[in-house]
Image (cartoon, rainbow, N blue to C red):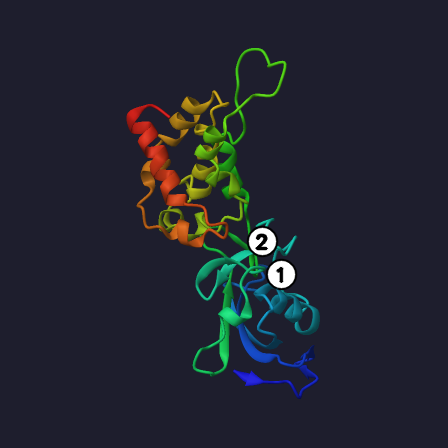
């Protein structure tokens, strides 16, 4: 870790008082010129309260405008900026520099790479279509039959609590792309799809649970889960993903929800 308080800039990037210099090692890939991904490093000034997304913006704005990554709200809600940070799936807008600084006082290196299991389109952003295809396949919406009610569908607080955890999913793909089964076999539905199926399977207002359970009983459904807990560890919203998958398995085994 190198103090840069007396410097005005580092590699052309404004260095505010109290900032430190961090080496950001990024996996780069441009399909128009590269045969394979490669690593490039950048020296970046950062405050302890900066987020990794701030570092990426500084590199793109001041050093290399060709750097490509997704982002939107920058507040951990949209899920756009999921990537591997120091080998762990995280949202770049939620990881603080102070949590990455070396404890021994030496210069810090932060590695950033795209999430695994999905085709890399360029640098840090991937093709999300296989992920959303699995999401759509589990019918992630309320299914009812018969005539529409004349008033809202009433639900008790206890019934709502039953699936509260899985309503938090922001479809960032951090859980699915942390799954070894998904890495090796892209046809697996993946944790996020199962979480979103869970959200409706256990909704007392829904009448499509059997349809979703039949879908997830497929060879590429819940039975492919190996309970490694990678998905739970990766979820930026704290969803108990592995627990939700096990509950869907139990629903299939006992044919009741």
Let me know if residue 26 appears in the view: yes
Q: Residue 7, located in which quarter of the rendered image? A: bottom right
Question: Left of 6 or right of it: where is 221?
Answer: left
Image: 128 above or below 7: above
* Residue drawn at (46%, 77%) of the image: 102
Image: 197 above or below 102: above
What residue is shown with label 2?
76
Q: Residue 44, located in which quarter of the rendered image? A: bottom right
Which callout, 1 or 2, points to the residue nearer the camera? Answer: 2
Question: Which label number is shown at residue 142?
Answer: none
Q: Residue 162, located in which quarter of the rendered image? A: top left
Image: 129 above or below 11: above
**Residue 52: x and y, percent?**
57, 66
Question: Of residues 43 and 206, which is closer to you in this image?
Answer: 206
Would you call the spot at circle 1 few (<14 residues within 10 Å), some (14-19), or many (20 or more)? some
* Residue drawn at (31%, 32%) of the image: 250
Question: Left of 12 or right of it: where is 100?
Answer: left
Question: Of residues 39 and 222, which is closer to you in this image?
Answer: 222
In space, the residues marked 1 and 2 are separated at their CA atoms by: 19 Å
Question: Which label number is shown at residue 68?
Answer: 1
Question: Left of 214 or right of it: where is 169?
Answer: right
- Residue at the left extreme of this rendering: 253
* Residue drawn at (55%, 22%) of the image: 154
SS at mark 1 in the image: loop
* Residue drawn at (54%, 77%) of the image: 23
Figure disc tally: 2
**Residue 158: x and y, percent?**
45, 30
Let me know if residue 219 appears in the view: no
Q: Quadrant of the C terminus?
A: top left
**Residue 113: x and y, percent?**
50, 63
């Amino acid at each position: 870790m190198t103090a840069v308080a007396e410097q005005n800039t580092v590699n052309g990037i404004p260095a505010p008082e109290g900032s430190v210099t961090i080496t950001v090692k990024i996996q780069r890939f441009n399909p128009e010129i590269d045969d394979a991904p490669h690593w490039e490093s950048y020296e970046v000034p950062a405050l302890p309260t900066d987020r990794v997304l701030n570092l990426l913006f500084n590199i793109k704005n001041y050093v290399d405008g060709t750097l490509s990554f997704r982002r939107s709200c920058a507040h951990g809600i949209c899920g756009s900026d999921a990537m591997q940070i120091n080998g762990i799936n995280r949202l770049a807008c939620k990881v603080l520099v102070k949590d990455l600084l070396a404890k021994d006082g030496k210069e810090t290196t932060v590695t950033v790479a795209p999430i695994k299991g999905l085709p890399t389109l360029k640098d840090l952003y991937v093709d999300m279509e296989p992920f959303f295809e699995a999401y759509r396949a589990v019918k992630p919406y309320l299914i009812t039959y018969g005539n529409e009610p004349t008033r809202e569908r009433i639900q008790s607080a206890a019934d709502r609590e039953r699936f509260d955890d899985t309503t938090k999913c922001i479809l960032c793909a951090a859980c699915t792309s942390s799954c070894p089964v998904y890495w090796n076999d892209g046809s697996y539905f993946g944790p996020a799809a199962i979480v979103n199926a869970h959200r409706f399977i256990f909704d007392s207002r829904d009448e499509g649970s059997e349809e979703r359970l039949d879908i997830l009983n497929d060879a590429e459904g819940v039975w492919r889960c190996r309970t490694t807990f990678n998905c739970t560890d990766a979820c930026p919203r704290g969803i108990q993903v592995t627990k939700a998958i096990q509950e869907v398995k139990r629903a299939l085994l006992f044919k009741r929800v």
